[in-house]
Image (tube, helix red, strand yellow):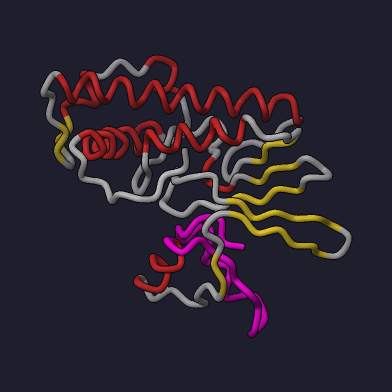
Amino acid sequence: MIGSDHGDHTGGNAAFPAGATFIAHPTSKKVIEDAKRPPFPTETVADRRAMRIGDKDVEILFLGRAHTGGDLSVYLPNEKILFMSEAYLHRIFPAMRSAYPSEWVKTVERAERMNATWYVPGHGFVDDAKTLREELGVYRRAMEQVIAEAKRLHDAGVPCERGACEAVAKGNWGDLKDWTLFQGQVEIAIRRVYDELDKKLPSGDNKS
């Protein structure tokens, strides 16, 4: 199952035997095919697929656009484990290069409402179940903080051009300045929120 179409989550797929089935969201399938990065997805899940693998019930879920336009999660209902791939980055500054900022927050809220004990992130530390659940809320609030601050800067007319983003220095980022990848991701996140506010992001069939 391809949870994210980014190279760090698909680069190892070529190591699987020929004939292996690769499942992706339709949006991710197109991204991978357009980028000509085989092996290509062979099946798609646009919303939900339930299956049984060995003695395990498994659900592949699209909870909404988040880190990419086609993030998929894997849920084990009996064990109450939700593998969130890059929709959950534990204590890593929100990476928004191809994200849908406000929708990402809603996607995480959907995950928080699920009957899960374990929330497994796609990047960052893996802790005990209680900590991971609490940290998912921390991450959601971090995204909300980034979005709110970028909106304030946008409404104030503070420019954020590639490589010359005044908004980085003028923003109030609080403790997020100490998060992993802050320096490399903050400008990207601001520009992405600006694009969302200016309605420059692709539209989609958003979950309600």
Residue 37 left/right relative to 173: right
Q: Is residue 21 magenta?
A: yes
Residue located 52% across and 28% down the image: 139
Q: Where does the image place residue 140, in percent across and percent down from the top left?
A: 50, 27
Residue located 17% across and 42% down the image: 162
Q: Nearer the viewer, residue 89 or 177?
A: 89
Q: Nearer the viewer, residue 14 or 68?
A: 68
Q: Where does the image place residue 134, in percent across and percent down from the top left?
A: 65, 23
Residue located 80% across and 64% down the image: 53
Residue at the front extreme of this rendering: 208
Residue located 63% across and 30% down the image: 113
Residue at the right extreme of this rendering: 55
Q: How many marks?
A: 0
Residue 22 left/right relative to 57: left
Residue 159 left/right relative to 131: left
- Asked if 90 appears above or below 58 in the picture, the reply is above
Q: Where does the image place residue 17, in percent across and percent down from the top left?
A: 67, 81
The stretch of residues the image draws in magenta is 1-27
Could you say which quadrant of the image residue 145 lies in? top left
Q: Where does the image place residue 181, in percent across and percent down from the top left?
A: 42, 36
Residue 118 left/right relative to 207: right
Could you say which quadrant of the image residue 32 lies in? bottom left
